[in-house]
Amino acid sequence: MSKAHWSIASVVGEPHAGRFASLEGYRAVAALSVVVFHVRGRLLVDTDTGQMDVIDNLGNFGVAMFFLLSGFLLYLPVSRRLFARASQPPTAQFLLRRFVRIFPAYWLAIIGFALTAPSIHRQSVTPWKVFLLFDGGLRFLGVSWTLVIELWFYFLIAALALVLPRVLRRCRTVSSVGRAQLIMLLVMALVAQCWRISVTGNAIDLVRYVNWLPSFLDWFAWGMLMAVLVAWIEHGGTLPKALKGLADHGWVCVALGALCYAMVMWVVRVPPSLTFSETRVATLFRFTMQPIAAFLLLLPATLGRPQHVLQRALRRPLIAAFGTVSYGLYLWHISVLGVVERNPIGSGGAWWMIVNLLVVVAVSFVLATLSYRLVERPALLMVPSAFERLARPEPSGQLARRVGETAPR
């Protein structure tokens, strides 16, 4: 182990190993995308035009990557057990683990934000609602609106883990289990499209309802699709040659993802004088294409060759370290940015923005690392032992005994 590797591992722990180790690197990319977006928006505001540039979409794209990662990582164990006809993990323990993954670090971050934010900002919120994430973060810690959606998705995963084994009990083959899951994901995508069409009809509904879980169901579904494909392969299935070939060529996936991203930027580059109906089209297009771009970038990490140069780069210790503490980085950079915005280093151009960006990233990384070492990791380690008695017993496995002979060995 190199000296640099050892020093990073001593701070945030050993980098994750295994087939999906590069996903930590993707977490880092997602978190840093959001940071760059916010720093650019707060420190280098373009007042000459109403157009967006490449950076202006990075925040939304980073959220798309986070949602796809959640869909993949949380649904993969469910899909594996569906294919294997095995009982699902205890629901209560899953929800408790998700609770301690989100709330302790969030509580620490909003306390830090309250201590650094201007008093007028603190007076505009209801403290207990913010503390419990009921406020949605729209008026306080700006990024926490995504956490509300994540929490609702956790409940959806728990519900699917309970319902799907019963719904799929009539499926006699592994392939029929796979088809049923694909149909479910298609339904989720259609629900998301219908919901977005209904809430983008006027500006009031757009502001009020677009940041609800239904608007992002297809974003999670793209990640869940990767989970189904991985579980299908693990249980003896094969992918279409075109899809497997695409996944194995990481740079082709990156190029196609960049093309989707460029298409989003081209559509949303509209002057503010245009009518709302055209803005509505741009909004619908952006919501549809964003997860496709993220899916293409994540595809090589889940279904491609693990030793591809892109995956090896994303497994590098420093990048993996940023991914490991990405949740804290996502939460704390808002507070750090607020302080830097009031006390910027220099002013007047893109180069000074880069200097301030490096300061925000460095300080946020330190705070995120402290959050991870002192709060996040200890809380997660406590869950299995502290809450084991609260978790309901696993199902008896009657479904596995009934049709287990159809599952591959």
Image (spheres, grey):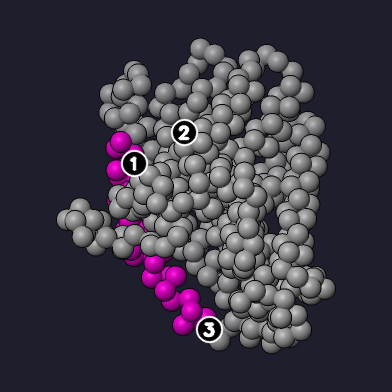
Q: Nearer the viewer, residue 161 or 338?
A: 161
Residue 9: horizontal and vertical position, in percent? 27, 60
Residue 192: horizontal and vertical position, in percent? 74, 45
Q: Quadrant of the C terminus?
A: bottom right
Q: Nearer the viewer, residue 79 or 136?
A: 79
Give amino acid for label 2.
Phe
Q: Is residue 193 visible?
A: yes
The answer to if 95 sits in the magenta stretch is: no
Residue 179: horizontal and vertical position, in percent? 76, 59
Q: Secondary structure at mark 1?
A: helix
Residue 370, placed above or below residue 211: below
Residue at image mark 1 = 361
Give amino acid for label 3.
Glu
* 69 on left or right of 376: right
Query: Disc 1 to disc 3, how far (Cα)?
Result: 38 Å
Q: Residue at x 80, y 32 (%)?
A: 201
Q: Residue at x 42, y 57 (%)?
A: 21
Query: Disc 2 to disc 1, how far (Cα)?
Result: 12 Å
Residue at image mark 3 = 388
Which residues are drawn in magenta?
A: 358-387
Q: Main secondary structure of the magenta part?
A: helix
* 317 on left or right of 202: left
Give amino acid for label 1.
Val
Residue 326: horizontal and vertical position, in percent? 42, 51
Q: Nearer the viewer, residue 104 or 140?
A: 104
Q: Which mark is residue 37?
A: 2
Q: Classify mark 2: residues with Cα within 10 Å, few (<14), some (14-19) or many (20+).
A: some
Q: Residue at x 64, y 83 (%)?
A: 394
Q: Are the residues tagged 1 and 3 within 8 Å (C-beta)?
A: no
